[in-house]
Amino acid sequence: MSKKGSGFERSFCKDLGLWWTDGKRDDIFWRTASSGARATMRFKKGRRTADSYADVMAIHITGKPLTDHSVFSLKRGYTGKKGKKSLNWASLLDIIDSPDNLKTEPAIVEWWKEIEKTRRQAMREHSFLIFKRDRKKELIGMAPSTFNYLEKMNTLYNGPTALISTSDICIIIMPLESFFSWCKPESLGRVIKQIKRRKK
């Protein structure tokens, strides 16, 4: 993970904590060690690893309800230079009009398959893919089943979305800032009485 990618993960974890605690704390979540590699290796040996899947873990008890039911994968810093993975591969047109004999799948397809595999290993309910192209807004992707569940738990969402559907995946994507404004933490398990402002 590049320094740019590491900074993106740290920033997201702080923003996630602020959303989760209504602005009270930014130290609820942090990056998992080696982006969940330890949990993956232990899974291959038939062992489970508490709260160490994908890219985000709870480092405070109040964040456990979220990571007990959801996994987060973060992608950042793909430049689009020749010969390197590019977030340009995530465009809708690239997914639709790429030749059938293309050896490499569009990045977003690879990423979604990866996070869904992790979700199944972790036995969680929801997968969230957060990604950002250079000089663009942060986006969040989720399965339609997760989106429909959140609409039932919150108000109907009327912000911008994109639906990516192929023979392998189906994802609904929206701006991350819109997600934070629309989705109430309680709909993903937050217990309000546990949230206390950090002592200085």
Image: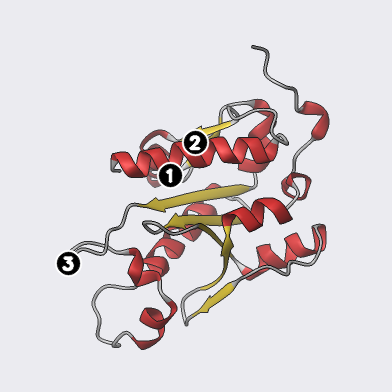
The residue that mark 2 highlights is 49
Judging by the rendered image, the residue that carries numbered circle 1 is: 43
Residue for point 21% across, 62% down: 84
Percent x, y of residue 59: 56, 27
Label 2: element kind: loop
User: Quadrant where the N terminus lies?
Assistant: top left
Residue holding disc 3:
82
Nearest the viewer among 4 and 136 is 136
Image coords of residue 166 (percent x, y)? 48, 81
Q: Crowding near pointer 2: few (<14 within 10 Å), some, many (20+)?
A: some
Residue 186 in picture, x, y percent from top left: 78, 45
Frontmost residue, 14 versus 170: 14
Residue 165 against residue 61 in the figure, above or below:
below
Q: Is residue 109 visible?
A: yes
Relative to 113, 59 lies left or right: right
Q: Residue furthest left?
A: 83
Query: Against 139, is 198 above or below?
Result: above
Which amino acid is tagged 1?
Phe
What coloring was used for the rendering?
secondary structure
Quarter-of-image position of residue 103: bottom left
- Secondary structure of residue under mark 3: loop
In the picture as drawn, the residue positioned furthest to the front comes out as: 135
In-image side of 132 versus 196 (left or right): left
Q: Tell me the CA gap for discs 2 and 3.
A: 37 Å
For mark 1, give the secondary structure.
helix
Work out whether mark 2 precedes mark 3 in sequence or the reverse, and give the earlier one: 2
> Is residue 36 visible in this depiction of the protein?
no
Are dots 2 and 1 in contact, CB under 8 Å? Answer: yes
